[in-house]
Image (spheres, grey):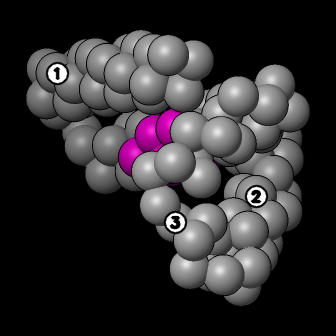
Amino acid sequence: MPLFQWLFQRLTGLVLLVGLFIHFLVMHYTGGEQIGYQAVMARLDNPLWVAFDLVFLLSVLYHGFNGLWGIVTEYTSDGILRRVLHAVIIMAVIGLTVTGVSIITA
């Protein structure tokens, strides 16, 4: 695994730990009204929350799919199967990124 992938896997892991702590604190420990649609929409009016959600989303996608990429690379020896699985991963990342960003910024 190249240094960039290794480093970003660790950095996104740290971002996910902090993001999960903030998520649980806000959504589960500040009252039940924080889970409702209106409360979430009110938070998304704040640019800081939009930035938090975008960083959290991109970190989840990178961390998860980079790990999956490594598993596919390590455990598939057939070149065609590996290329197909890598293409599926790339398409999934693109689709989920576009969907997530459009939902957060809508």
The magenta region covers 61-68
Q: Residue at x 61, y 66 (%)?
A: 34
In what element is the residue under mark 1?
helix
The x and y percentages for residue 30 are 74, 79
Residue 105 makes an appearance in the image: yes
Q: Is residue 75 above or below residue 42?
A: below
How many angstroms separate mark 2 from mark 3 (CA)?
16 Å
Residue at left offset 79%, top offset 31%? 46
Residue designated by label 2: 19
Among the two numbered marks 3 and 1 on one chain, the one whose residue lies closer to the N terminus: 3
Q: CA distance from mark 3 to mark 1?
A: 39 Å
Quadrant housing residue 45: top right
Instruction: Please state the horizontal and vertical placement of residue 39, each as a whole percent of the image.
Output: 59, 53
Q: Is residue 31 above or below residue 13?
A: below
**Mark nearer the viewer, 3 or 1:** 3
Q: Which residue is mark 3?
A: 35
Look at the numbered disc 3 and give the secondary structure of its residue: helix
Residue at 76% across, 58% down: 19
